[in-house]
Image: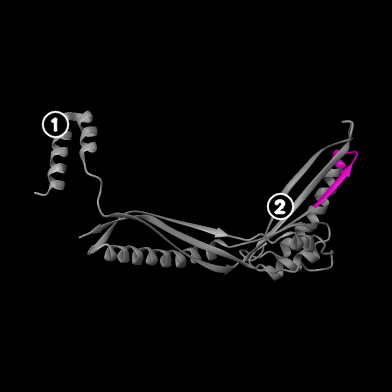
Amino acid sequence: MSDHRRCLAVALCAALLGGPAAVAVAAETLPPPQGVVSLSASASVEVVRDLLTVTLSTTREGADAAAVQSQLKQALDAALAEAKRAAKPGQLEVQTGNFSISPRYTNKGASNGWQGSAELVLEGRDMQAIGQLTGRITTLTIGRVGYNLSRELREKSEGEVSAQAIARYRAKAADYAKQFGYAGYAIREVNVSANEQMPPRGVPMQMKAMAVGSEEALPVEPGKGTVSVNVSGTVQMNR
């Protein structure tokens, strides 16, 4: 019996005979694992963002809260009616956003009427249709524009990149085992994590979008983002 196996047998016997305290002692007597190496590998791919989100909004002010609310509702109802005519599941989704009314105050803290805002959110993969719709909505103006990946594209990209990262991890483990003079390896533990890097569109694009007039379609240019997958963990190299 090798020294390692003899130490392991002694430790197990001590644990079985001596209870919890003996278990702790037995753990201390075990030799540290041999031939264990920590590895990591990653893969990434650039993908064109296929999901556009446009938030349109408007504000109103007045002395009467009910009047402000009514004006906001009229503006939102008109925009919503126009948007619903163009809505297509998955391609152009429509939903209302924030709707709020709050008191307005002077610099001295005195009440000075009411102010409110309303939002309409357009989202989908048909970017041209969304851009054209924003030009037909005249009661709201563009507040925010954002690009992202749809769930379908994200899952597809992560699946492809995960396979590449795992293959690189396995190849690296086999290569290290060979270089250290081992016959092979076994995976002890492994972690797989995915993330997206979506560069911001920047201030110029945002300002251009906000300046679009009521008769113009919003120009769209989604750009690319990066989907990355990292694989990390430890492997046991075997003789």
Dot 1: element:
helix
Q: With 222 as the anchor, is 63 left or right in this view?
A: right
Query: Label 1, on which residue?
Result: 17
Which range is magenta?
Answer: 58-67
**Front in this rendered view, residue 122 or 46:** 46
Residue at image position (43%, 63%) is 162
Q: Position of residue 174 (x, y in %)?
A: 30, 65
Q: With 200 as the anchor, is 104 left or right in this view?
A: right
Q: Position of residue 205 (x, y in %)?
A: 74, 63
Residue at image position (57%, 68%) is 47
Magenta span includes 84: no
The quarter of the picture where residue 128 lies is: bottom right
Label 2 vs 1, first from the N-terminus: 1
Magenta span includes 65: yes
Dot 2: element:
strand
**Front in this rendered view, residue 103 or 79:** 103
Query: Label 2, on which residue?
Result: 96
Q: Where is residue 192 in the image (x, y as percent from the top left)?
A: 42, 56
Q: Position of residue 235 (x, y in %)?
A: 31, 56
What crowding class fits label 2: few (fewer than 14 Cα within 10 Å), some (14-19), or many (20 or more)?
A: some
Residue at image position (72%, 47%) is 98
Disc 2 residue type (three-letter): Thr
Above or below residue 218? Residue 101 is: above
What crowding class fits label 1: few (fewer than 14 Cα within 10 Å), some (14-19), or many (20 or more)?
A: few
